[in-house]
Image (tube, grey):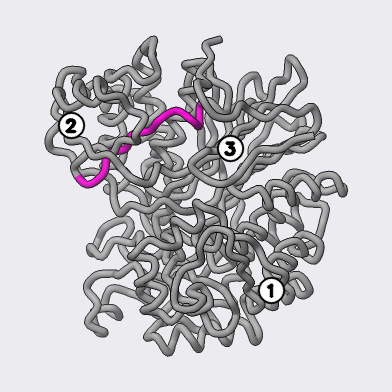
Amino acid sequence: MRDFHTAGRGPAFATNAMAATSMPEATLTAIEVMKAGGNALDAAIAAAAVLAVVEPQSTGVGGDLFCLYSPAGSGKVIALNGSGRTPAGLSLDALAAKGVSSYEASSVHAITVPGGVCAWETLAKTHGRKGLDELLAPAIRFAEGGYVVTPRVAADWAEAPVVAKLKKNGAGIFLPGGSTPAPGTVMRNPDLAATLRAIAKEGAKAFYTGPIAARIVKDLQARGGFHTEEDFAAGLSLAEFVTPISRSFAGHEIWECPPNGSGIIALMLMGIMDGFAPSADPLDPLRLHRHVEAARLVYRDRDAFLGDPAFSEVPVAHLLSDDYISGLRGLISDERALETLPAAGSLHKDTVYIAVVDAEGNCCSFINSIFQSFGSGIVAGDTGVVMHNRGFSFSMRRGHPNEVAPNKRPMHTIIPAMAFKNNQPQIVFGVMGGQYQPMGQSWVVANMLNYGMDPQAALDLPRIFPFAGRVEVERGISASARAKLEAKGHRLAEIDLPHGGGQVIRLDHERGILIGGSDPRKDGCALGY
């Protein structure tokens, strides 16, 4: 096997259990939960709650989640959609009456009722072993006692658009002394601790009904929102078990959540790339070119077809069919970039992804998000909860599958994944970064399955992404590769902050070990025992 670790850390190894998250506190929490008798799902929920405190720009109580779970020895994948819906009073006509013709990322109208808390409770009750009272305790301690702001979190926090959003919406709790915290600053959120304590004691109903919901709704209505207490009470049934979708890639079956999630786009991208013979060099300009072109094609289809399947049919079988995938592949020229395709939509680099495998072999692929950095920038009432802005993904075009409408879920970017072979889970993986996720998932899993990389090397490898009519490249892409891409017609731009993040756990059934990696683009780690 080729050694792709020219610098940096190697993968983590374990014989019993492993967790990988974007913050050490969350990874350690997951390990401690499993050592105390919890399973992989319990560990993921506890880690997600900790991340809601210590990585507040990426996730929170006011966000959504999706989850894939494979019980040990079952050969099955269970999928949960924990995404929220719009208020019953929100529609294009209602927005037009208020003079709103387009969304702003910081708008109250971009806030759907968050589905994450309902999903936490639903998953814990159906497949976990511990209650929210125990699972939320570590997060409460961090919110009350304080956590240390790490370098990557501080960098995300200090971005000018984020600061402007927080100031605009009066989120002073995240601007101590009027500015963002430097690395090493100890931050606390006692209001969030109180909210988490109520959820730990009373369950999800403490968030969706009663005083907390009333305070959130009052705040949102004061900002012009259509939200009602009835909308939030309906949030108690947001979490929904759904049928996962899959497609083969490199001799493995890749599993994703179905629409309204965009996991189908990752499967389409993998399907296109699976028809090309892998190059010898993982950073061969031809591989980069093909991957970019495939991404542009499938993101075009995402923007044309994806939405809430309860409102319009998403042609899943057609989009994943061999004939359709082959047709897309046939549009790609190895000599020249396509000139007429739109690029992916709005860019953001936040969200948290958690991979956990416990000592029994239960596998959890878990993703939690408030969408863009600090979501809407609105901290509702005195709850300490940052409200996401997932509704920013809606289309304002009448008749579009993703058109904003009452009680509707938007097209969603967050996508957990698993790879199976011989009816056994082989890889638990996910790549964060909003629109980048299908591109990132297909890139990382191909690094492992086509190029023999371990999880850490697969995550380390430099990345590219087509965005806004250009191809964004990380600094590790060589000058010669860039020149060859430009010769094919790609307009390149080097980015300052890297694309997304990710976590991977690989199950080596033959040797009886777990191999983990955590993206160096974040501050996290993989740990096992």
Circles 2 and 3: CB distance less than 8 Å?
no
The residue at 52%/38% (across/down) is: 520
Placement of the C terminus among the 4 image quadrants: top right
The CA distance from mark 3 to mark 1 is 28 Å
**What residue sits right under mark 2 in the picture?**
490
Q: Amino acid at mark 1?
A: Ala
- What's the mark number on residue 193? 1
Magenta-highlighted residues: 458-468
In the image, is residue 363 above or below residue 60?
Answer: above
Residue 448, position as x, y percentages in the image: 52, 22
The CA distance from mark 1 to mark 2 is 48 Å
In the image, is residue 456 above or below residue 355?
Answer: above
In the image, is residue 485 above or below residue 137?
Answer: above
Classify residue 477 by image quadrant: top left
Residue 361, position as x, y percentages in the image: 76, 33
Classify mark 2: helix, strand or loop.
Answer: loop
Q: Decide which of tag 1 and tag 2 comes sooner along the chain.
A: 1
Q: Is residue 227 left or right of residue 81?
A: left
Residue 515, position as x, y percentages in the image: 67, 27
Q: Amino acid at mark 2?
A: His
- What's the mark number on residue 518? 3
- What's the mark number on residue 145? none
Q: Decide which of tag 3 and tag 1 comes sooner along the chain.
A: 1
Residue 233 shown in magenta = no
Q: Tell which of 475 and 386 is nearer to you.
A: 475
